[in-house]
Amino acid sequence: MALMKNLLELFRVDAQVRGLRGRLDSSKRYLDAQNRLLNELEQRMQEIEARRRQTQAKIGNLESETQSCDERIEKLREELNSAVNNKQYSSVLSELNTVKAQRDELDERTIEEMSGVEELDQELEEVKQQIAERTKVRDHAQSEYDEREREIRDRLSELEEERAAAAENVPEGELEVFNDLAEQYDGEAMAPLEEIDRRHREYACAACNMHVPFEQVSLLFSGSDTLVRCGACSRILYLQEETRGTLAQK
Ligand SMILES: [Zn+2]
């Protein structure tokens, strides 16, 4: 009998510890998710900034190419003016036209790259706005988490001490079974025995609804210190007061 009483006490305190931790866990998960989203946005901003720098460098190169073209054009114009014969004139003119065409092409490319910078600036503006909004959400999540943590810190350490004390009252082997099941079933290591039909001696595990053989039920009612576990889900079975009562009336 003592074993079952101590196990139920452990079960009760363990559920309280888990419940309290669960409240903190969910706000921690939310906070982590916000931080992840914020990191993604910041990464995106850095990518856009890198692309912008590359495009600016390209524009710089195009501009210096354009300048050389202009210098060349200037020189060819002078040569054109001082041409001594038709042959020389038309040869210089032909080169001048080629360089002018190159310059036009450079202009076009420069304009294209510049509109690329404008687009990147717009993207940058959008992502910065998203970062500002996300930062607000994250900061709120952080303060919510901090507040919850402060609220429950003392109660949680109290309960954890209580849990440790309750665990000390359970023998090592049974404690291991309990802990494994609690891990597996998120704290639900024990399940009440449910009476389906007393006359037909039908009982079931209240957690998984599987039938529990009457020999096991008898063992449980006998109050022996042997663990009775559900054959299907392995949870440790226990009697609730009302179930115990009905058998007593029999
Ligand atoms: Zn079960």
Image (spheres, rainbow, N blue to C red):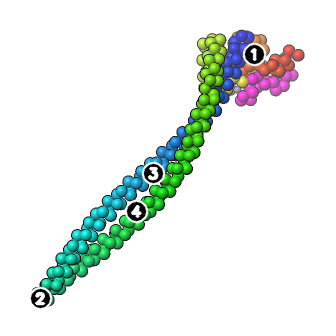
Q: Position of residue 77 (x, y in %)?
A: 19, 81
Residue lying at 38% horizontally and 54% vertically, measured from the top left? 50
Q: Is mark 3 within 8 Å of ligand 1?
A: no
The residue lying furthest to the bottom in this view is 86
Which type of secondary structure does the marked residue at label 2 adopt? loop
Residue lying at 78% horizontally and 25% vertically, measured from the top left? 194
- Residue at image mark 3: 44
Query: In the rendering, which numbered label is found on residue 117?
Result: 4
Say whether disc 4 or disc 3 marks the residue closer to the N-terminus. Answer: 3
Q: CA distance from mark 4 to mark 2?
A: 48 Å
Say whether disc 1 or disc 2 marks the residue closer to the N-terminus. Answer: 2
Query: In the rendering, which numbered label is found on residue 78?
Result: none
Q: Quadrant of the N terminus?
A: top right
Residue lying at 63% horizontally and 20% vertically, measured from the top left? 158
- Residue at image mark 2: 85
The residue lying furthest to the left in this view is 84
- Residue at image mark 1: 220
